[in-house]
Amino acid sequence: MSKKGKAKNTVNKAKHTRLMNQKINKVKLEKQQTKERLKAIILKANEQKDQES
């Protein structure tokens, strides 16, 4: 299992701040989109289950 810390070279690297923030925001956005997709799949499955019953 990988470590869950900060990305390398993020401390005291002012010129890389923008790039590191882009990277961090991309990960956050991907996690959020994954959660939304899973919720949509679950809702659809539940609706189909209710219609069958």
Image: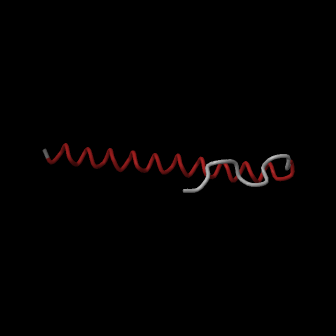
Q: Is residue 9 left or right of residue 28?
A: right
Residue at 53% of width from left, 49% of height from top? 31
Q: Nearer the viewer, residue 9 or 48?
A: 9
Residue 19 point in image, percent of width and height: 76, 54
Residue 20 point in image, percent of width and height: 74, 51
Count of marks placed on residues: 0
Q: Is residue 51 left or right of residue 45?
A: left
Residue at 38% of width from left, 47% of height from top? 40
Residue 10 point in image, percent of width and height: 78, 50
Q: Nearer the viewer, residue 37 or 20?
A: 20
Q: Is residue 25 left or right of residue 50?
A: right
Which of the 4 image quadrants contains residue 53?
Answer: top left
Residue at 71% of width from left, 52% of height from top? 7
Q: Nearer the viewer, residue 43 or 1?
A: 1
Locate the N terminus and report the quarter of the image it occupies: bottom right
Q: How is the image coloured?
A: secondary structure
Which residue reaches farthest left?
Answer: 53
Residue 52 point in image, percent of width and height: 15, 48
